[in-house]
Amino acid sequence: MKSAVAVFPGINRERDMARTLKLISGTEPAMIWHAETALPAGTDLVVIPGGFSYGDYLRCGAIAARSPIMDAVRAHAARGGLVLGVCNGFQILCESGLLPGVLMRNKALKFICKDVYLRVERSDTPFTRGYNAGQVVRVPVAHGEGNYVADEETVKRLEGEGRVLYRYAGPDGSLDPAWNINGAVNSIAGILSERGNVLGMMPHPENHVDASIGSTDGRGLFAGLADHFKRVA
Amino acid sequence: MKARVTVTLKSGILDPQGKAIEGALKSLGVAGVASVRQGKVFDIEIEGADKLRAEAALKEAAEKLLANTVIENYRIEVL
């Protein structure tokens, strides 16, 4: 799996992401500065990591979404290439038009930094094949604007087309609103693009891949991606 | 030429920041506050004196960057 991590000023999770990609796939990702206009030839997966690109000025992800590298990311997605956006990366993907909707301020107005439980809704996508449908995984979140909002029509389409891949849930997979940490519509934590090749999610699976941290629940996402590319190749 | 772009949340979009400000105004005892919605104001200096061109540029700025039209409306004024 040949991956590339996009790096914007103010991003701070790119090294966690790069370490995880290397650990799981065995291949060092290319780190691509935002001012670049092209991705390395043969890139399978582009990752937009978390952080605070441009200090969250204007709107989270708004300025990064208009940077030169994002044209190359859009072209990669248009060719059917895979794109993963985590946290600020999810916000950037929404702002760039690669995913519908927007991440609003958390309902309780607080920055939330803790482990959450996610229910994996399906396992037949490159981003979830390392899990079973209905499986619950524990991964951390760290965000102030993760409250997913879209118009009614869009939410209906996302649900109808099975494009909600991850939801905030309880340890038993229940969708009680008490587990919906940020107030996202339908407890949405991660969504897929129409073509099924772009995933945006608020939680940080890349931070739960090492047993020394305590949980390795995030490995499945990356192991699934690596497996996907092994099968494609 | 001085211009102003005002960006406001569309109605129906939850505005937790506006709600918090509304709560604070009420707790300060400011009389008659029914509700608060927070928005943004951009004061922009436009080169030249062509008002139509200025408006076109401001519209482009608002559509491309200043507003997220999924959740926000914008208003342009050339002052």
Image (cartoon, helix red, strand yellow):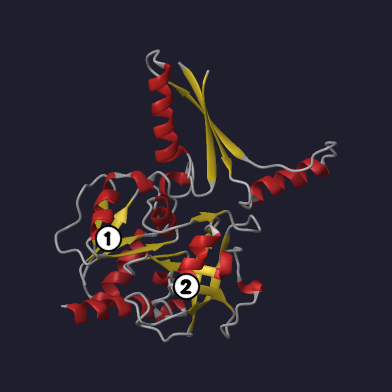
Disc ID at residue A160: 2
Q: How many marks?
A: 2
Disc ID at residue A89: none
Indicate the position of residue A218 as horizontal and vertical percent values.
Answer: 41, 76
Q: Secondary structure at mark 2?
A: helix
Lateral position of residue B18 relative to residue A62, left or right: right
Res. A203 visible in picture: no
The answer to whether dots 2 and 1 both sit on one chain is yes
Res. A8 visible in picture: yes
For disc 1, the neighbor class at 10 Å (few under 14, some 14 to 19, many from 20) is: many
- Quadrant for the N terminus of chain A, please: bottom left
The CA distance from mark 2 to mark 1 is 22 Å
- Of A10 and A48, nearer the camera is A48
Lateral position of residue A96 relative to residue A111, left or right: left
**Residue type highlighted by circle 1:** Ala
- Of A74 and A43, nearer the camera is A74
Q: Secondary structure at mark 1?
A: helix
Indicate the position of residue A201 as horizontal and vertical percent values.
Answer: 44, 66
The image quadrant of residue B40 is: top right
Check the residue under mark 1 and report the chain it is in.
Answer: A
Indicate the position of residue A44 as horizontal and vertical percent values.
Answer: 22, 67
Which residue: 27% across, 45% down?
A68
For disc 2, the neighbor class at 10 Å (few under 14, some 14 to 19, many from 20) is: few
- Of A172 and A154, nearer the camera is A154
Disc ID at residue A77: 1
